[in-house]
Structures are given as C-alpha cells and as structure tokens.
Image (cartoon, grey):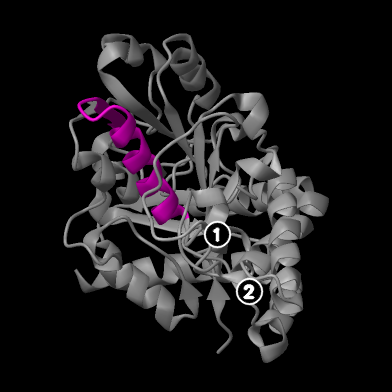
Amino acid sequence: MPRHYLDHASTSPARPAVVEAMLPWLTGDGAGDPGRVHTEGRMARAAIEDAREQVAVLLGARPREVVFTSGATEAANAAVWGAARRRPEGLMAYAEVEHSAVRDASARHRSTVVPVDRTGRIDPAALSNLDPADVALVHCQWGNHEVGTLQPVAQVVEWCRAHEVLVHIDAAQAAGRVPIDFDGLGADLMSVSAHKLGGPKGVGALLVRRGLRLDPMLVGGEQERARRAGLENVPGIVGFGAAARALSECLLQECERSLQQSERLLTRLEQMLGVHAFTPADRALRLPHIACFAVDGVEAEPVLLGLDQAGIAAHSGSACSSESLEPSPVLEAMGVDADHSLRFSVGWSTTEADVDAAIDALPRVVERLRALR
C-alpha cells in the first residue's frame, strides 16, 4: 500500500538538493573543525558562511544576524534566556497558542498570558494592558502550528518598538511558507527550524537584530561569534543553506500550491456531516499548508489509527498524538474541542494523489467508527 505523508507541519522530508549538499560533509574529507586554520577547517568555515548568507537571503536578514542553533526549540529558549539575563525581574508575555518551547521556557520566569480569540489570533490592543517597564520579552508566533492562524506580527513589533520592549517572533512554521523580511519587520529576535521547510533535522537559527547584545545560553566556546558555544553542525548547516537556496527560487510557487491543496482538503472534508474547520478560510489570515478541523462523534486517536492503516500520516491536537498526556493548549485557548481535532499539513513533496487519498480515506474511516458506536 502506498503511503501518503500529510504531516509536514511536524517535519518535512529533506529535499533532494539538501541531501546532495550534505553528503560531502558527512565524509572524512569534510570533517574539518571550522575553527581551525588548516585547509580542512577553512573549507568548513567557508561552507558555513555560504549557508549563513543563503539563510539570511531567504529570511530578509543580514548574514551576521543569523546564529545557527540545533533547532527552533533551542533558539526560542536562547531568546528567553538572553532576555531574562538582560532584565531578570521582567515579565515574559506570550499567548497560550504559542509553541510549548516558548510557553515552557517563559514559564520558568515571571510571565503573563496574552488572550486570543476563537481563531487563535491575539489582539495587539491587549498589549496596552502591560507595563512596558515590567516586560522583559514579548513573544508572537508568525503563524500557528496547529490551526495555521497568522498573527498580527507587524502590529506587535510596532508596539514593542514604541515601548522599547524586546520582541521574539517564532517563525518555525512560517519560514519557507510565506515571505519573511526580518530586517523590514524590525523584530529583535526570530527563531526558525530547518526541518520544517525541507532541510535536515537538528539545525535551526536564532536571528538577532543588528546591534542587540544578549548573553548566550550555551557557553564554553567562541563559536557563532561567541553567541552560541559548541562545534558547528557543518553538514546540517550546509543542508539548511541548500534548503534556503532552493526556497529562494520557488517560495511563491510552493506557497500557492500548498494553499490550493489545503483549501481542497478543507472544502471537500467540510462537505462531510459533522466536520468543522478550525483553520481560517481567508487566505490572508492563514498559513498556506495547514488544514485543521474537528470531526464530531469520534475521538481523534481511532481516526488517526484508521488513517494510518489506510496509508495516511496525519496529526491531532489531542493527547493521543503527542508525548504529553494533556490536550492541546492551543485549541483549549481557542475554546474548541481538542479531543476531536485533526490536522492535515502539506509540503514541498505533497502530490495531488496524497490529497486525493486523504479525501477518500477520512469519510470511510469516520463512517466505520461511527457505526461501531
């Protein structure tokens, strides 16, 4: 039975160009320490700096603003760490729809929660309830990882700039999905992950605005201009650069294709009795690759298992699909039922056959489960 992978919001397979770019750096010839002056070291250093420029181009940043990390989780934690060191008693402000990396890192400090509406979108006016002198860092994800809602990042950044408050944008789901102009946005910090956009696992970046100095979370070396200690993951960084280079050439085309595929999924599935979309219908308010919805009358876990048996890989916001035993705080913050939610997410390798398979399989799986009741 063919498999149909529709969980790209969790992770995407590496693009062929990424694998090809990484291979030479996984062998002995590419094993040099980029901090050394011998030929092998200088070659590794050049490869890292080339990748840094490629990532910067994709994200609208200067190369020196790109700090390579092990992923967006580390990047978000580093942002919180640096902001807390800068203002130790300051509040971390975030919405419950933020990724757990942001929520959990912030919850280690004094924190406050920004409310959201039923689409998972924050109201920038709610920031006016904060005392800027008491805030260390404001978090705002570019787009939500479960329902796809785009946040008013420009308005949030504008408020933070006006009140001289640091702001961190989690762009892990948005990078490679929508155009991003980090310098034009004016944010202080931004976290991204390579594996979400067809790059390798285990590498990401924290973008740090030019002129901003934060204490590094990882110490013990002078790597990344003393902003993140530890021997650089040269193969991963090279692969990240290759993915960024590929996307710089095809981002808008991929975005449009993903929108068409996710819209077709939502349109067809909402024709089923008892299916309700959580993803905003308006293209201007959503990420292109996510289709999240509820199915009345059946729990998410048996639906996911039935889809898997039919060759479909999908995700849910309920406990059955997570390492956690708790329902999705994103959907709970929106006031919707996490126990019946499902998420299909498309990506660079998604075909029309994958979409057709999901549209065909879900009604059959749900009908069979409802009949068992």
In the picture, the quarter occupied by the N terminus is bottom right
Residue position for label 2: 235
In the image, residue 351 lies at what x, y percent?
A: 69, 68
Residue position for label 1: 196
Q: Which residues are magenta?
A: 72-94
Q: Give the main secondary structure of the magenta stretch.
A: helix
- Is the residue 221 above or below the residue 176 in the image? below
Mark found first going from the N terminus, 2 or 1 = 1
Residue 90 is covered by the magenta coloring: yes
Cα gap from disc 2 to disc 1, whole angstroms: 17 Å
* SS for dot 2: helix
In the image, residue 84 lies at what x, y percent?
A: 29, 34
In the image, residue 22 lies at what x, y percent?
A: 69, 77
In the orientation shown, which residue stands out farthest toward the front? 37
In the picture, the quarter occupied by the C terminus is bottom left
Q: Amino acid at mark 1?
A: Lys
Residue 343 is covered by the magenta coloring: no
Residue sitting at x 37%, y 33%: 120
Residue 28 or 122: which is nearer the viewer? 28
- Is the residue 297 above or below the residue 252 in the image? below
Residue 252 or 225: which is nearer the viewer? 225
